Image (cartoon, grey):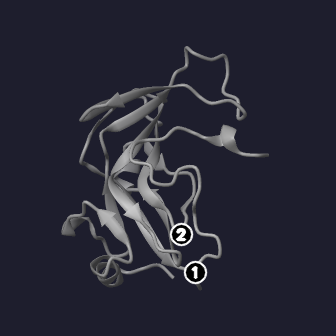
């Protein structure tokens, strides 16, 4: 079941869900708007021949208040908000419609697992033919929370737990 704004306010007030920092205007009818942080990663295209799933990627790191994403470019970013979920609530991140309508695709590659704590790394892709300028602090995506039918037997304790900045792919750590 998707969590409503009234239930979100209650869960936030009692500390069951943590979203910090949070302003009242970010709470929407069935989600919370998340803002763009100031930490970015770009794959260092000049340091490797190809991307391989079994090798660590090299990234160029940026920390700035404003960034321009060139046309048809991919970039990792981070939310300003730190999120903490209990073992019985999951979430997913979606781009805001108004942002998607300018050609900026935003995702975070799946669910935010129950038990996760940290900032959210966002994958940004400029599908437009013009550069897109983004400023830190701008509402860029939304997080939707869902109640599970019970607590997870194995809540998240993975390789991205407690991240505070944009974190590149750690797929090379997978055992398959």
Residue 25 lies, in percent from the top left, at: 20, 67
Residue 93 lies, in percent from the top left, at: 46, 59
Which residue is at 57% across, 60% downward? Answer: 157
Contact check, label 2 and label 1, Cβ < 8 Å = yes
Q: State the image quarter where residue 31 is shown.
A: bottom left
113 over 164 or under it: above or below: below
Q: Which residue is labeled 2 in the image?
A: 114
Which residue is at 35% across, 57% downward? Answer: 82
Task: Label 1, secondary structure: give it.
Answer: loop
Q: Which residue is labeled 1 in the image?
A: 151
Residue at the far left in the pictured view: 24
Q: State the image quarter where residue 21 is shown.
A: bottom left
**Residue 5 visible in the current orientation:** yes
Q: Pointer 1: residues within 10 angstroms few (<14), some, or many (20+)?
A: some
Q: Is residue 175 left or right of residue 75?
A: right
Q: Earlier in the sequence, mark 2 or mark 1?
A: 2
**Residue 130 visible in the current orientation:** no
**Front one among 60 and 29:** 60
Task: Label 2, secondary structure: give it.
Answer: loop
Q: Is residue 96 left or right of residue 152?
A: left
**Front one among 150 and 9:** 150
Which residue is at 38% across, 56% downward? Answer: 97
Q: Pointer 2: residues within 10 angstroms few (<14), some, or many (20+)?
A: many
Which residue is at 53% across, 78% downward? Answer: 88
Residue 109 lies, in percent from the top left, at: 56, 51
Q: Is residue 168 left or right of residue 132?
A: right
Task: Give the distance between the C-alpha atoms of the residues marked 2 and 1, in whole angstroms.
Answer: 8 Å
């Amino acid at each position: 079941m998707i969590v409503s704004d009234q239930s979100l306010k209650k869960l936030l007030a009692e500390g069951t869900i943590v979203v910090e920092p949070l302003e009242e205007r970010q709470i929407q009818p069935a989600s919370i708007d998340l803002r763009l942080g100031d930490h970015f990663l770009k794959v260092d295209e000049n340091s490797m021949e190809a991307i391989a799933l079994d090798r660590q990627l090299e990234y160029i790191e940026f920390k700035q208040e404003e960034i321009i994403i060139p046309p048809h470019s991919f970039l990792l970013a981070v939310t300003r908000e730190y999120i903490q979920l209990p073992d019985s609530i999951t979430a997913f991140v979606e781009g805001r419609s108004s942002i998607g309508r300018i050609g900026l695709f935003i995702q975070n590659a799946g669910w935010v697992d129950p038990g996760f704590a940290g900032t959210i790394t966002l994958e940004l892709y400029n599908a437009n033919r013009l550069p897109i300028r983004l400023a830190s602090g701008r509402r860029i995506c939304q997080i939707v929370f869902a109640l599970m039918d019970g607590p997870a037997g194995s809540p998240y304790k993975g390789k991205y737990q407690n991240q505070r900045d944009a974190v590149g792919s750690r797929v090379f750590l997978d055992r398959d």
